[in-house]
Amino acid sequence: MAELIILKLGGSVITDKSGRCSVDIERISALAEEISARKDIFPIIVHGAGSCGHPEAKEHHLDKGLDQTNKAGIFITHHAVRQLNDAVVNALRASGVEAVGLHPLDACTAKNGRLISFECGPIELLVKNGIVPVLHGDVAMDEERGACIVSGDQLISYLAGSISVDRIGLATDVPGVLEDGRVISHIDAVSARNLKINESGNTDVTGGMRGKIDELLTLAEKGIESNIFHVSRTGDFLDGRDHGGTVVTRENVHEKI
Ligand code: IPE
């Protein structure tokens, strides 16, 4: 049976972050071809927003919740990331991979920025029927704040807690988690505490690499490890080879001998 894999495509690898909703069709098509070429894996795709959603979310300060001034931000942000979702679904289908977009705004509820419900039934049935679900970071309705931004990373952490998957990988625009310019091969909750991550001052609404690590550590605590690697190594990850990136694991799993 094919291995079930959650693959997150970071927003910065599928959009050009310097433009406004500038979709990198070439990169998306190349990734779709990589996926289509592999018959031993079956992916659930989750993608980020990059320049199709982050600027809108920030402009409408949705990360601070909903008030009387920013209601339109829900439509505007959701619409932007949905356009990117269509591009990913279309590229997969053009490569011969049957796929369909699913939108968290329609199917989940959050409380104080954290997902408290997400209907996973349709995802499981799509997988069972050989159709690739394509989800994305999104604006979501929030019981406390009115609305919030749910990152693709938070979605992964929720999904992997509900659906049993074989492997989790995050394709990013960096080769892994970097400290002093070098890739850290393994991170656990203990080593993460002392980690000095250099991020640009302009961290996006979902917290950049630190937000990603925190999310993946939540998953690691449940015994589910995940992999962060450069997008150019996606094929290696899909094939189960060394991807040269970072593995986020439960404490002490990879103790030095
Ligand atoms: C952000 O999702 C969603 C919105 C801003 C609507 P992510 O946080 O997963 O996006 P990237 O990967 O950082 O671009």
Image (tube, rainbow, N blue to C red):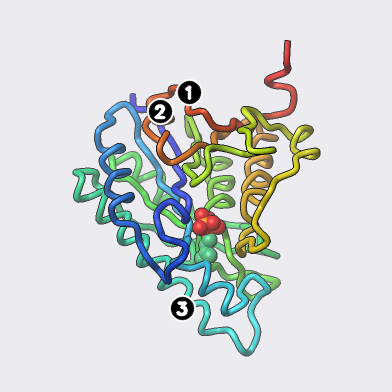
Q: Which amino acid does label 2 sit on?
A: Asp
Which tag, 3 or 1, sits closer to the chain's start? 3
Kindly indicate whether the residue at mark 1 contacts the one at mark 3 (C-beta within 8 angstroms): no
Q: Is residue 118 visible?
A: no
Residue 39 location (% of width, % of height): 27, 29
Say the numbered circle drawn on residue 242: 1
Residue lying farthest front?
181
Relative to 123, say whether 201 is above or below. Answer: below
Q: Name the residue under label 2.
A: 236
> Would you say residue 115 is visible in this rendering?
yes
Residue 162 in the image: state x and y as whole percent: 55, 42
Label 2 close to label 1 by CB (< 8 Å) = yes
Q: Residues within 10 Å of mark 1 (few under 14, many from 20)?
A: few
Residue type marked 1 = Asp
Badge 2 local density, few (<14 within 10 Å), some, or many (20+)? some
Q: Which residue is drawn at 43% across and 51% down?
A: 13
Classify mark 3: helix, strand or loop.
Answer: helix
Estimate the spatial distance between the alpha carbons at disc 2 and disc 1, rounded to whole Å.
6 Å
| SS for dot 2 | helix
Q: Residue 4 carries which label?
A: none
